[in-house]
Image (tube, grey):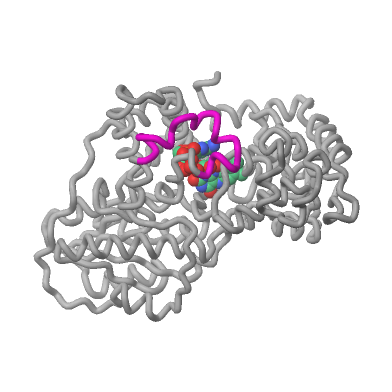
Amino acid sequence: MDIIILHRNLRLEDNSALFHGSHKQNYRVLYVYDKHYWSSDGRSPRQFSFFVDCLKELQIGLTKLNSYVEIFQGSYSDLATYIETNYPQSSIHLNHSTDTSYFRDQMSKFKNIFKESQRLKVYEDFGIQTQEFNRDRWSYDWNMQMRKERLDLPKSNLNHEPADLMTLDDFLDSQNIIQRSFQKGGTKEANALLNSFFESRSEGYSKKMSSPHDAEESCSRLSPHIAFGTISIREIYQKLESYYPQSQFKRDLYSFRKRLYWHCHFIQKLETEPELEFNSMHRMCDNLRESENKEFIDRWINGETGFPFMDACMLYLREKGWINFRMRAMIMSFASYNLWQPWQSTSPLLGELFVDYEPGIHIPQVQMQSGVTGINLPRIYSVNKQSLDQDPEAKWIKQIIPSLNDIDPKKIHSADLQTAYISPVVDLKQSAKYARDTIWSIRKGDEFKKIARSVYFKHGSRKRS
Ligand SMILES: Cc1cc2nc3c(=O)[nH]c(=O)nc-3n(C[C@H](O)[C@H](O)[C@H](O)COP(=O)(O)OP(=O)(O)OC[C@H]3O[C@@H](n4cnc5c(N)ncnc54)[C@H](O)[C@@H]3O)c2cc1C
């Protein structure tokens, strides 16, 4: 018997665990539903809703292979006991996932249980190094991984043993899920997005990605699909390579290709140094922002800062479950520089709002936009400048905050609205100056530079060196 465990690789094709686990045609497919995982930092019902779409579609595909998804409710330790008791001779197959500490700790115990018997096979998925970490060879390895031949569909199942675990339908009935659609999950949807992106939506992508209004349509919108693995990053890469020569939007697709690389480059940081979930990449930066201001954080996460563009971005994100890169960076920069809040407090709250929450990208990006990596120059976004640059006539802002409909765009951009809007939570210029002075005062020291060098050797991109 082969036991295949799903986590965040919810697709049939190019799925190593499914492909290899189905080889002997005697297999079971399990998803471990652990409610503690789903309530851990950064996780939220909007991600669960997307995940359910993916699982339902996968179930349809598996049915055609005479198989289906079974739900194991409990922890990975409980699962190990279940397997040892019921299937002591089985082989177990799963794909590696870089995730937060809760999952990682569970997984490490699970792996230890099966270490001696060597029954557990863990397969690579993204282009990250999980065994021998070598930063200097990283780029080469990534390219090799992307060019490997893709794996076919799993073989059909000949095992007719009645299942003793919950079926997906029973599980979904038991959960009372109120599904709210942000983005729809599933491989079909991922392929539709990829095709429409290549054929037309990528026109002007490299410029349009900066505007929250244009980016909604012009970005690929594949992020939750990559995070939940409805399509492999290798498939995206290979389809891109074959589409590229005939594309009229080569410059745009070149920018897209770079981002596929960044995807894994960022995840590698958390994989290499899991402590980044709690500590700043440059440890001296952990002492910068020690105390938390609950009122500031509440106003920030609820879109009530008094800066219309900042608030519009947050309200849009709350509504859609997604926003473009530049606005994510600005939102984070505002919390960390202008509000001077510890990123450890704000990061999970922001993660919960993203359907595409991917800890390996989110946490290092949060750190980068908070100036705590030591290897990236601190960039303090001016909310007022972004407002003017990205939405000069304030049309987008007014759509989201209709109470500002009759107000002159200039006043909106400068957040000079008196009683017409919430009063600003901080003074933008003064708070940015305080942040800049404080950050630079520690960056100048020799000790800071010494630590920064070691951070660079561990995490820095060799392309820039
Ligand atoms: C504070 C902050 C938090 C973020 N959190 C997440 C997160 O939880 N999950 C997530 O997928 N992305 C995150 N990003 C990166 C980026 O904003 C999103 O990947 C992107 O907006 C997703 O939209 P898209 O799929 O249409 O992107 P596209 O522009 O179409 O890019 C294609 C893919 O490339 C990858 N990618 C794009 N930009 C980046 C980047 N800057 N760094 C790493 N990979 C990138 C993503 O996998 C994305 O799906 C974060 C960025 C910031 C500044």
Residue 200 falls within the magenta-colored stretch: yes
Residue 202, above or below 246: below
- Asked whether residue 271 appears in the rendered view, the answer is no
The stretch of residues the image draws in magenta is 196-216
Give the residue displayed 64% in from the left and 57% down from the top.
349
In the image, residue 7 lies at what x, y percent?
Answer: 37, 58
Along the horizontal axis of the image, is 380 left or right of 185?
right
Q: What is the total number of numbered labels drawn onto the structure image?
A: 0
In the image, residue 348 lies at what x, y percent?
Answer: 62, 56
Give the residue displayed 78% in from the left and 48% down from the top.
307
Main SS of the magenta part reads helix
> Between residues 388 and 302, which one lies in front from this camera angle?
388
> Between residues 297 and 74, which one lies in front from this camera angle?
297
Q: Tell me the quarter of the image containing the N terminus.
A: bottom left
- Asked whether residue 398 appears in the rendered view, the answer is yes
Q: Which residue lies furthest to the left in this view?
A: 158
In the image, residue 204 lies at what x, y percent?
Answer: 49, 29
